[in-house]
Image (spheres, coloured by chain):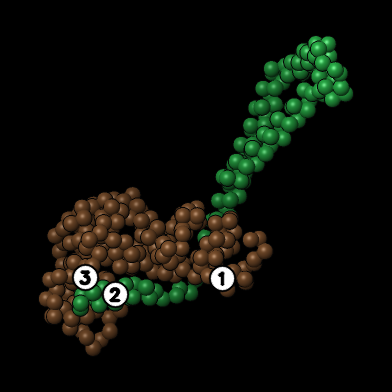
Amino acid sequence: MAELDFERRLERLFGETPHMGDSVAFAERVERRLDRGWTARRWLIGAAGGAGGIIGASQLLMSNIFERVQSAEQSARVLGQGLSRVTPTTDMVSALSGGYGVWIAVGLAVITMGFAVSRVIEEI
Amino acid sequence: MSGANQSSFASLHDVELCSYAAAGERRAFGELVRRHGSAVRGLLRRMGAQAAEADDTAQDAFLAAFERIAEFRGEGTFAGWVKKIAARQYLRRLQRDRKLTAFAQEDVEEEADVSAGDADHRIDLDEALKVLSAAERVCVSMCYGAGLSHGEAAEALNLPLGTVKSHVKRGLEKLRARLAPGDGAKTGGAVLEGRRGNG
């Protein structure tokens, strides 16, 4: 029993740490390091995003995206004409089967990508 | 969560501050550091760290705690949780500086007269800890200051459990001789392995 009392007393003594005069300055140093870490992280994410954007844009340009879009438009027109033969024509179908459809799809894809990237950054 | 400012943080409980910190509110975490910084630094000094070394390690420990704040469930105290992190950080530092190798030796020479206790004269813990060897000091501080079990301390120190128990036992005997010399006679100092011995 005596040794238990002594151990409790020891724990109590360990718990009684004198308050240090520079505790505020110490906390400020920790906060500054935290801020530095977050700033560095933001820069890192921004730089990674910028680099990714540049690489993505250059890849798009190198793969002749505009020619591909034009050929896709032509394909869509052909498909639309084929559809108009077998189904009643509506404004919506004709609008989507033209060049607009491709651009709407690209726009939706960009929005989806933006949403996904923002979620990933939030998680990080 | 973003509406709170520094003055309102001062009135919040640790668990609430942890919630704010987990949501990325760094000022809330700063309040926790203000409250418990002294305790963590004090523990590290008691483990044997120099003042500057203790401050650096405590800073690292708080930064690590902020990164892992979501793991803190409020089951124990925040101070206890950070103390454990800090104690482990200090051990890593000792390991990096290759100062832990001597801890593996179980037969440590007496560094001071352990029978120098005087019941009429209060000797504080910091003075009493100076009597212990480095290994005993670290082991006792980890178990009674940071709240680790013998098993957890052995794992953190990468030492056999028996070695840690020996260090703790010898450390407790020396501390008892300094802090409570009268009680030592009752038990003969033979059973002071510590109630954490099952860890």
Query: Which residue is under mark 1?
Result: B12
Between disc 3 and disc 1, the foreground one is 1
**Chain for mark 1?**
B
Mark 3–mark 1 CB contact (< 8 Å): no
Q: What percent of the width, then of the height, locates residue B172?
A: 21, 70
Q: What percent of the width, then of the height, locates residue B105?
A: 17, 55
One can see residue A4 in this view:
yes
Relative placement, left or right, of B26 versus B89 is: right
| B64, B120: nearer the viewer | B64
| B22, B34: nearer the viewer | B22
Between disc 3 and disc 2, the foreground one is 2
- Chain corresponding to green in the figure: A
Q: What percent of the width, then of the height, locates residue B9?
A: 59, 69
Classify mark 2: helix, strand or loop.
Answer: helix
Quadrant in which the N terminus of chain B is drawn: bottom right
Query: Which residue is under mark 3?
Result: B172
Relative placement, left or right, of A84 versus A9 is: right
Which of disc 1 and disc 3 is earlier in sequence? 1
Relative placement, left or right, of B165 versus A9 is: left
Q: Looking at this rendering, what residue extends furthest in the bottom direction? A: B120
The residue located at (20%, 77%) in the rendering is A1
- Chain corresponding to brown in the figure: B
Q: What percent of the width, then of the height, locates residue B158?
A: 26, 51
Quadrant in which the C terminus of chain B is drawn: bottom left
Query: Identity of the amino acid at label 2?
Result: Arg
Marks 3 and 2 on same chain: no
Marks 3 and 1 on same chain: yes
Query: Identity of the amino acid at label 3?
Result: Leu
**Chain for mark 2?**
A
Q: CA distance from mark 2 to mark 1?
A: 29 Å
Query: Which residue is under mark 2?
Result: A8
